[in-house]
Structure formats: structure tokens, C-alpha cells
């Protein structure tokens, strides 16, 4: 039942009663971690479950590994099973942040071998504009989520250091341009970017309403990446990089890899070892 990574509000509304569709609300605010849960309780798409970026889609922060390390797979798998997710389930993720957090779940599911997953184009706002929402909480269901990690979809800092200068590899920095060039760094202790990385800000693949560019528009956006045999994508902490990975998939550029620790992981070693960081 897998679609092409994106569903419209109209399609989702027409399939709310489909037992093979599970909806997941991923709304979150980095500056106010409780906000997403509060928004969900105040109103969500009928039948939607909630997953929290910090509590469900990440694990606790360590010395290295970045600000949003990948979650413990067994714990996430148990929650997904309680949503009734089986190998035949289409999971639809949404947020209100231009796919920033929905894409994290999209990527995680694919990393766990569940390719039947899509994001809601335009997010919660696009749905709410046309269709009613609810405060009713969905029941716990019985599913058998089967996770099989696909290690080829992820790289660590050693792999980035090894491959970043090879001519057939492109490293993509997904952060805003001002952070990429080191003029503004509001979160991490070191400014700049991984040497050799090119900048494709994650917000450039959607419009201000959160609708993704068309496949042809995304193909044009990423035209310079067609030369690469391998694309490694990072951001600040491995979250918004997933928006670029989603958009690359839609554009037909397959096999993009996530540097899950991202810049916050790179920084942690830079502080320890005076690792190279580039500022332009």
C-alpha cells in the first residue's frame, strides 16, 4: 500500500477509516518541548497517535552522538506495535513545521525496514483548513511491528571523515545558510560546517505553507547532486536533514545517507580534539 512518500489532506481524509492506515502526529517545538503534546491534546487528525521527538524519536543525549541520538529501537518498535502497525500498514506522519519532525519518523521507519510510510503534504494546517479535527484519543491497538535496521542508510563521524573528500561523494549541510557559513550559530558551541560540505537548507524544499515542491521542481533543485554516487546529509542534530532525504527520494536521487549525529556530534569532537571546522 506504499504511496510515493507524500499524501494529500484530501487523500488522508478519504482513508481515515482504512484499517491499513495509521496516522502519527509528530508536532514538536525545539524551544518548548511540551508544545507538541499540548497541541495534540487540543486537537488532532481523527485517529492520530502522537510521538514526541525527544521522548520517542530520540534517545538521551550523551557526550557524543549529537543532540538527538537515534531512539532505542526496541522501545520505538513497541510503541509502533501499540499503534497497530504491521508490515501491511501505511504510516502517515504529519507536523506543523514544514515536515521537520514528520520526516524524522519517515526516515526512522525506512531505516527500520518499513517503506510504506508517507508524510502529509501541508501538514496539520492544510488538513484542518478543510476537515474537522478531534480531541478523542485513539485506542491502543495490537500490531506486530517488525524492525530490521538497514545500516546502509546511516553513517557515523568516522565514515564522514573517510568519505567526505572523495570526488564521487557529496556531503550536504541542511541548515540555514547563515549557520552554514558560520555567521550565526544559535545552538551549537562551534560555528561553521564540515569541510567540503555544500549547503541545501531544508526549508527550501517546501513553500511557506509547508507544501513540498513538485517532483520536477525538486529534481531541478538537486540537479548538481546527480553527479554523486553517494550523498551524505546532515543538519544540526539529525532531524531536519531528514527533510532533505525525503525530498531527495521524491526527486529520484536514491540512497541518501543520514549522518545521524550531524553538526552537534561533529562539534563534540571538535571541542575535544580541535577537529577541523570550516567557516567561510
Image: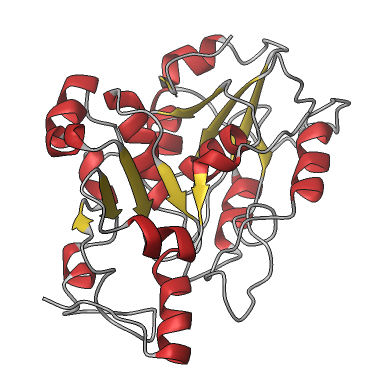
Left or right, 104 with reference to 138: left
**How many labels sit on residues?**
0
Q: Which quarter of the rendered picture does the C terminus lie within?
A: bottom left
Q: Is residue 41 above or below residue 187?
A: above
Q: Is residue 185 above or below residue 180?
A: below
Residue shown at 30% from the left, 81% from the top: 276
Residue shown at 51% from the left, 17% from the top: 12
Q: Provide residue 250's location: percent of width, then percent of height.
A: 33, 25
Residue shown at 47% from the left, 41% from the top: 103
Q: Provide residue 46's location: percent of width, then percent of height.
A: 64, 27
Left or right, 19 with reference to 239: right
Q: Is residue 215 above or below residue 27?
A: above
The answer to which quarter of the image holds residue 89 is top right
Residue nearer the viewer, 218 or 160: 160
Residue shown at 43% from the left, 14% from the top: 10
Q: Provide residue 261's location: percent of width, then percent of height.
A: 50, 64
User: Furthest residue to the right?
Assistant: 142
Q: Provide residue 252's location: percent of width, then percent of height.
A: 30, 22
Left or right, 270 with reference to 169: right
Q: Is residue 99 something one can see in this rendering? A: no
Q: Which quarter of the rendered picture does the N terminus lie within?
A: top right
Q: Is residue 66 something one can see in this rendering? A: yes
The answer to which quarter of the image holds residue 192 is bottom left
Left or right, 64 with reference to 235: right
Protein image colouring: secondary structure
The answer to which quarter of the image holds residue 111 is top right
Amino acid at each position: 500500500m506504499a504511496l510515493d512518500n507524500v499524501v494529500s489532506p484530501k487523500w488522508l481524509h478519504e482513508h481515515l477509516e482504512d484499517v491499513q492506515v495509521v496516522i502519527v502526529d509528530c508536532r514538536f517545538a525545539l524551544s518548548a518541548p511540551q508544545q507538541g503534546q499540548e497541541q495534540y491534546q487540543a486537537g488532532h487528525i481523527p485517529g492520530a497517535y502522537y510521538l514526541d521527538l525527544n521522548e520517542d524519536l530520540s534517545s538521551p543525549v550523551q557526550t557524543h552522538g549529537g543532540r538527538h541520538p537515534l531512539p532505542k529501537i526496541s522501545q520505538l518498535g513497541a510503541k509502533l506495535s501499540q499503534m497497530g502497525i504491521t508490515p501491511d500498514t501505511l504510516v502517515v506522519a504529519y507536523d506543523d513545521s514544514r515536515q521537520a519532525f514528520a520526516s524524522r519518523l519517515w526516515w526512522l521507519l525506512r531505516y527500520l525496514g518499513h517503506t510504506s510510510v508517507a508524510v502529509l503534504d501541508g501538514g496539520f494546517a492544510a488538513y484542518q483548513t478543510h476537515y474537522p479535527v478531534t480531541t478523542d484519543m485513539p485506542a491502543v491497538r495490537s500490531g506486530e511491528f517488525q524492525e530490521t535496521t538497514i545500516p546502509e542508510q546511516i553513517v557515523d563521524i568516522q565514515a564522514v571523515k573517510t568519505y567526505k573528500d572523495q570526488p564521487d561523494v557529496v556531503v550536504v549541510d541542511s541548515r540555514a545558510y547563515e549557520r552554514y557559513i558560520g555567521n550565526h550559530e544559535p545552538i551549537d558551541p562551534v560555528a561553521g560546517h564540515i569541510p567540503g560540505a555544500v549547503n541545501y537548507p531544508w526549508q527550501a524544499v517546501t513553500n511557506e505553507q509547508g507544501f513540498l515542491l513538485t517532483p520536477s521542481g525538486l529534481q531541478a533543485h538537486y540537479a548538481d547532486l546527480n553527479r554523486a554516487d553517494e550523498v551524505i546529509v546532515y543538519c544540526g542534530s539529525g532531524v531536519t536533514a531528514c527533510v532533505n532525504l525525503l525530498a531527495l527520494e521524491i526527486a529520484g536521487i536514491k540512497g541518501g545517507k543520514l549522518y545521524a549525529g550531524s553538526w552537534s556530534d561533529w562539534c563534540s569532537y571538535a571541542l575535544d580534539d580541535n577537529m577541523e571546522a570550516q567557516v567561510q
